[in-house]
């Protein structure tokens, strides 16, 4: 019996992911910290998360699926990884609304509505009506997790069709759709509402499959992924990430160009 292949943990990628996560947190806590937005472009961290996810998923599962891992097994592993903490967040959101009903009578929400949000949230069903400020009202940040699950399912479902040529076409088409969606919205900060949920698809599609393509392209070379386990570059990458998040060009045209350049080039 052959020993299991060693499992590589790329702490440098985790470091970049951690900096991005803290940046998003500061962005959402801006009203408590400053007059304007803290790190005003840090919503682009979501695109960085999707890119890292595509890279890591390809690195972790390409060989396993080639060797016989089924779609159901892959999906079960991803649900076990993603769902428990998501469920905890959703239940906490429900608890918050119930407490709010008791303490702030002017913002009372009918229990039937809370029940609807809880049921759809637990089943990972987005709410797209005009009355909802986000597709998952009890756990707003989980909109990106929803798209993560969608693109993970797509990756496994069409895995054996995803040659490098197909990936390249998929990334290129997704980028074109993303350019159109960004031009219409005046920003890349979309996908979390019912009105922008469709635009969120090319957003996750582009970054995730670009990550898959990068991983497979690098793996062709001897020790192509070895540099990820060395730390000489991570400080520069984190500094560049923070610079990208800190800059916010004025005007819709500058905003769109900056956002697209950040995710497609930087």
Image: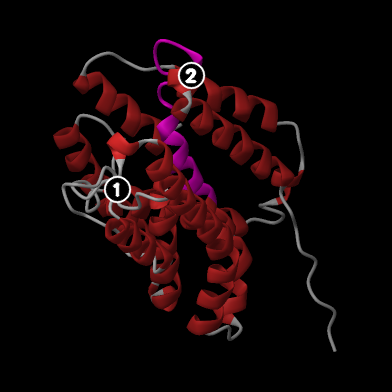
The secondary element bearing badge 2 is classed as helix
User: Which residue is found at the position 27% from the left and 13% from the top?
Assistant: 250
Task: Residue under label 2, please give it.
Answer: 32
Within 10 angstroms of label 2, few (less than 14), some, or many (20 or more) residues? few
Sequence order check: which comes first, mark 1 or mark 2?
2
Quarter of the image containing the N terminus? bottom right
Residue 98 against residue 242 in the figure, above or below: below
Q: Is residue 54 left or right of residue 108?
A: right
Q: Is residue 40 visible?
A: yes
Task: Residue under label 1, please give it.
Answer: 109
Of the numbered discs in the image, which one, if any, rests on residue 145?
Answer: none
Q: Is residue 12 left or right of residue 266?
A: right
User: Which residue is found at the position 64% from the left and 25% from the top?
Assistant: 236
Q: Is residue 46 magenta?
A: yes
Between 255 and 162, the one lying in front of the other is 255
Identify the image's colour scheme: rainbow, by chain, secondary structure or one colour. Answer: secondary structure
The secondary element bearing badge 1 is classed as loop
In three-dimensional space, the C-alpha distance between marks 1 and 2, rounded to whole angstroms, equals: 25 Å
Residue 198 against residue 39 in the figure, above or below: below
- Residue 208, image x and y in percent? 43, 54
Q: Is residue 185 left or right of residue 72?
A: left
Within 10 angstroms of label 1, few (less than 14), some, or many (20 or more) residues? few
Q: Looking at the rendering, which quadrant does residue 215 occupy?
A: bottom right
- Residue 106, image x and y in percent? 28, 35
User: Which residue is found at the position 59% from the left and 70% from the top?
Assistant: 80
Segment tinted magenta in the rendering: 33-52
Between 15 and 122, the one lying in front of the other is 122
- Residue 206, image x and y in percent? 35, 50
Residue 200 against residue 259 in the figure, above or below: below
Magenta stretch, overall SS: helix
Q: Is residue 67 magenta?
A: no
């Amino acid at each position: 019996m052959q020993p299991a292949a060693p499992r590589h943990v790329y702490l440098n990628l985790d470091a970049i992911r951690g900096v991005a996560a803290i940046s998003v947190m500061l962005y959402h806590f801006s009203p408590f910290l400053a007059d304007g937005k803290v790190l005003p472009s840090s919503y682009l961290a979501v695109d960085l998360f999707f890119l890292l996810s595509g890279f890591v998923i390809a690195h972790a599962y390409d060989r396993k699926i080639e060797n016989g891992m089924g779609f159901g097994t892959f999906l079960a592993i991803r649900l076990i990884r993603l769902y428990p903490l998501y469920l905890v967040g959703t239940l906490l959101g429900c608890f918050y609304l119930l407490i709010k009903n008791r303490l702030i009578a002017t913002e009372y929400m009918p229990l039937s509505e809370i029940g609807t949000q809880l049921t759809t949230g637990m089943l990972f069903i987005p709410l797209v009506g005009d009355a909802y400020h986000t597709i998952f009202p009890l756990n707003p940040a989980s909109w990106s997790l929803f798209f993560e699950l969608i693109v993970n399912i797509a990756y496994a479902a069409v895995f054996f069709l995803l040659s490098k040529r197909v990936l390249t076409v998929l990334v290129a088409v997704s980028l074109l759709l993303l350019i159109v969606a960004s031009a219409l919205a005046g920003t890349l900060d979309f996908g979390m509402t019912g009105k922008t949920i469709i635009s969120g698809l090319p957003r996750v599609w582009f970054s995730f499959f670009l990550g898959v393509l990068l991983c497979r392209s690098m793996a062709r070379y001897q020790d192509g992924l070895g540099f990820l386990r060395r730390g000489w570059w991570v400080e520069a990458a984190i500094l560049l990430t923070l610079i990208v998040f800190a800059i916010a060009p004025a005007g819709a045209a500058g905003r769109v160009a900056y956002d697209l350049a950040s995710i497609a080039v930087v």
